[in-house]
Image: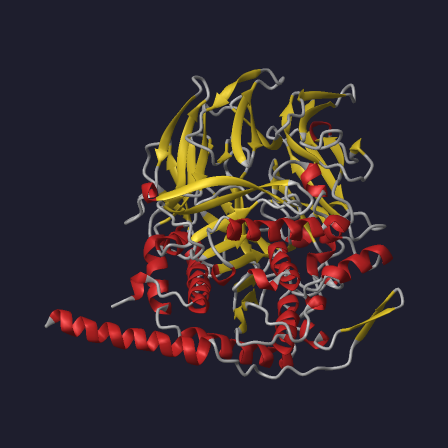
């Protein structure tokens, strides 16, 4: 009887799935009408039509009404997927485990972040030593009723008496408010600092440096171009209105400026950046002498970057790519004003460098996997940190008096594990290992492959899936890429991805040119007038997956966010035949106007600008928005963005969605999912899990796949 009833239930359920697939997934949708208004921009004699220009004003009533209509269609379509709720339940279940950050230490106290499992925000704890009882310092889940306000940073003063912490000023936005906490009482003091973006506090004595912008005009927070950043000093216990101005370049209000202090607070180091260039200039002043002016270390602005690592007596330790595309560590003597090389350039990229316990930790990337070397402060090699396997190691930060440091190691099929490294002995031991219910890493395998791009360049890609994968061309596969801004896609673990792989899904992450995986040469090969190389690499990655019979065009999805969203849009225009599903997330889709919004001017160094005649022609040639063709059957597309994204403003996705819905032929759905109270990425864990469930459900539904966990 039980078997008979089960069969009836299963038959009814499968009929519902079939009905969804036939009536919804394969029937042309009736999209909400989007008004077209005449608007023309002229670039060097070329007229470019922009009929959806009005969608750039996300505060306008007409835009808000358009957003509401689009969301109504999208969420009603998603709600009809019979297994959507089951997908959400499985992703939540696999994500429900305790997550810890690498600890940091101050005056015998240990601080760390922990998420019990499904908390919207991780909680900051403090304990005495490594074995003390943890106590809550800050619980960001109490900052707002919906858990969308984040604790963005927390930094202790040198003596540990105070801490300054940052909260999101607007959920999802890059705007920050700074608060000061008295650590003895754990009470937040009355002063609040506003209009801060892209700045970290840097302590000196009883106050700290920070960078801020002028107060924006009302309603301009999400769209106004950012200019006029300046450096200020705030003294604890005073109002922001009494802060002392430190540095401002009134002749160049478009420059970004920031000050860092060394651990001993002796030196303040000023960095100035012209957003049209990749590099920065560098200046310093000796705080112990009461200097007011900054003396030049690197006075000129160029394509070369200089990042402060720390100090050793009179020497500043600086990581730079000047004369070293893979980066090196150099020192600048403030008495002799001479440079010296501490760690010479290696064949591998010097990804990061940090100081702790009188040691220098240098992390290199070798074919996109971490290799960590330990040195004396003069550069003398002292050994290496033994890592469990190829993967990603991060951390190794600390202070001069620390006797140990902490680091996190993870891989595509290995959750982040915390290690404690004892500086005196060079030994590592597991400090905390995650316990994920029902997850066995032995069931999954990860490997790195190399394929050739169109011009013969050898490009790496990580592939992870369940063991025993059949090479029959039928495996549902997500190809993920970024390819820009010198950003490396290091192997990492994702709990929500486990739900995808459990169903036979494959996840492939391609390390495209434009990233930083192989140093500045790799970056330059995919930026500005070389951007097509990035798209060619992505196309070659898709062709590799198909030719190796890992998947087929009917089972392949392309995913990317931000600059990766641009990647998805551009590749889709060039090779729509390779993919069944496209997932452009918070993408830069209008390559002619991106620099006019928020921090978009900072991307000119990587993209170029339509203000330049040669670059305009090149940008117009691949801009996702401007290269959608009428009558093409584009793959099923789920565009995702957020109403409070002030990094890549939602207008990019709005205009792209309207154009795609207008021009695409065929039956595949082209939907836009617009999150509220979020920004450039989900503003809390539950929103992130909901989006992951919708993304996977959208893929499965359009590939005609019924996940096994959803069956009766």
State the residue lying farthest toward the left. 1
| Residue 667, visible in the rendered structure | yes
Corner quadrant of residue 14: bottom left
Front-lying residue, 511 or 327 = 511
- Residue 496 drawn at (x, y percent): 40, 54
Q: Measured along the vertical axis of the image, is residue 59 above or below residue 441?
A: below
- Residue 38 drawn at (x, y percent): 77, 81
Corner quadrant of residue 690: bottom left
Q: Is residue 346 left or right of residue 544?
A: right
Which residue is rendered at x = 65% and y = 53% of the image? Answer: 535
Quarter of the picture containing the C terminus is bottom left
Which residue is rendered at x = 73% and y = 77% of the image? Answer: 51
Front-lying residue, 178 or 595 = 595
Which residue is rendered at x = 64% and y = 44% of the image? Answer: 515
- Residue 492 drawn at (x, y percent): 47, 44
Q: Measured along the vertical axis of the image, is residue 339 above or below residue 701?
A: above
Quarter of the picture containing the N terminus is bottom left
Which residue is rendered at x = 45% and y = 55% of the image? Answer: 473
């Amino acid at each position: 009887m039980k078997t008979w009833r089960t069969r009836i239930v299963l038959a009814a359920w499968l009929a519902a799935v079939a009905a969804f697939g036939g009536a919804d997934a394969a029937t042309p949708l009736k999209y909400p009408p989007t008004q077209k208004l005449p608007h023309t921009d002229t670039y060097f004699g070329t007229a470019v039509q922009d009929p959806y220009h009005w969608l750039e004003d996300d505060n306008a009533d007409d835009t808000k009404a358009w957003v509401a209509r689009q969301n109504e269609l999208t969420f009603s379509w998603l709600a009809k997927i019979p297994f959507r709720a089951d997908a959400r339940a499985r992703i939540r279940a696999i994500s429900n485990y305790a997550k810890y950050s690498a600890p940091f230490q101050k005056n015998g106290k240990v601080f760390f972040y922990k998420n019990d499992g499904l908390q919207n925000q991780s909680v900051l704890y403090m304990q005495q030593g490594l074995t003390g009882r943890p106590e809550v310092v800050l619980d960001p889940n109490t900052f707002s009723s919906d858990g969308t306000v984040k604790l963005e940073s927390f930094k202790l003063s040198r003596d540990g008496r105070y801490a300054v912490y940052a909260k999101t000023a607007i959920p999802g936005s890059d705007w920050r408010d700074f608060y000061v906490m008295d650590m003895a009482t754990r009470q937040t003091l009355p002063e609040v600092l506003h209009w801060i973006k892209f700045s970290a506090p840097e302590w000196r004595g009883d106050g700290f440096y920070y960078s801020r912008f002028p107060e924006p005009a009302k309603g301009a927070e999400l769209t106004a171009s950012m200019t006029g950043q300046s450096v200020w000093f705030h003294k604890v216990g005073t109002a922001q209105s009494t802060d002392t101005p430190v540095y401002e370049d009134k002749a160049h209000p478009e420059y970004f400026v920031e000050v860092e202090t060394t651990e001993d607070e002796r030196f303040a180091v000023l960095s100035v950046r012209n957003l049209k260039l990749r590099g920065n200039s560098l200046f310093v002043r000796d705080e112990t002498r009461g200097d007011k002016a900054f003396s030049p270390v690197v006075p000129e602005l160029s394509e070369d970057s200089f990042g402060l690592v720390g100090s050793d007596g009179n020497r500043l330790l600086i990581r730079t790519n000047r004369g070293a595309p893979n980066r090196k560590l150099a020192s600048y003597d403030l008495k002799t004003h001479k440079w010296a090389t501490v760690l010479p350039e290696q064949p591998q990229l010097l990804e990061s460098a940090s100081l702790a316990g009188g040691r220098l930790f240098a992390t290199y990337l070798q074919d996109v996997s971490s290799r960590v070397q330990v040195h004396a402060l003069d550069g003398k090699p002292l050994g290496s940190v033994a890592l469990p396997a190829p993967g990603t190691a991060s951390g190794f930060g600390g202070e001069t008096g620390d006797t140990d440091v902490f680091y996190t190691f993870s891989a595509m099929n290995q959750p982040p594990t915390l290690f404690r490294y004892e500086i005196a002995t060079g030994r590592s031991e597991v400090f905390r290992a995650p316990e994920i219910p029902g997850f066995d890493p032995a069931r999954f395998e990860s490997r790195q492959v190399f394929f050739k791009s169109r011009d013969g360049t050898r490009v790496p890609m990580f592939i992870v899936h369940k063991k025993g994968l059949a090479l029959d061309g039928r495996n549902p596969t997500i190809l993920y890429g970024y390819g820009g801004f010198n950003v490396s896609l290091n192997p990492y673990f994702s709990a929500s991805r486990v739900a995808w792989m459990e169903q036979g899904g494959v996840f492939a992450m391609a390390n495209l040119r434009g990233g930083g995986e192989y140093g500045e040469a790799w970056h330059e090969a995919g930026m500005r007038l070389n951007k097509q190389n990035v798209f060619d690499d992505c196309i070659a990655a898709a062709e590799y997956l198909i030719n190796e019979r890992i998947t087929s065009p009917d089972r392949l999805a392309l995913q990317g966010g931000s600059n990766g969203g641009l990647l998805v849009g551009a590749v889709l225009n060039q090779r729509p035949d390779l993919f069944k599903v496209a997932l452009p997330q918070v993408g830069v889709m209008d390559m002619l106007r991106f620099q006019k919004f928020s921090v978009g001017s900072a991307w000119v160094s990587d993209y170029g600008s339509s203000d330049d005649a040669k670059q305009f022609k090149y940008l117009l040639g691949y801009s996702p928005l401007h290269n959608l063709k009428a009558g093409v059957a584009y793959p099923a597309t789920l565009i995702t963005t957020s109403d409070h994204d002030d990094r890549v403003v939602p207008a990019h996705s709005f205009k792209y969605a309207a154009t795609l819905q207008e021009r695409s032929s065929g039956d595949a759905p082209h939907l836009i999912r617009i999150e509220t109270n979020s920004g450039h990425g989900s503003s809390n864990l539950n929103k992130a899990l909901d989006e992951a469930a919708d993304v996977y459900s959208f893929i499965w539904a359009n590939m005609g796949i019924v996940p096994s966990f959803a069956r009766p």
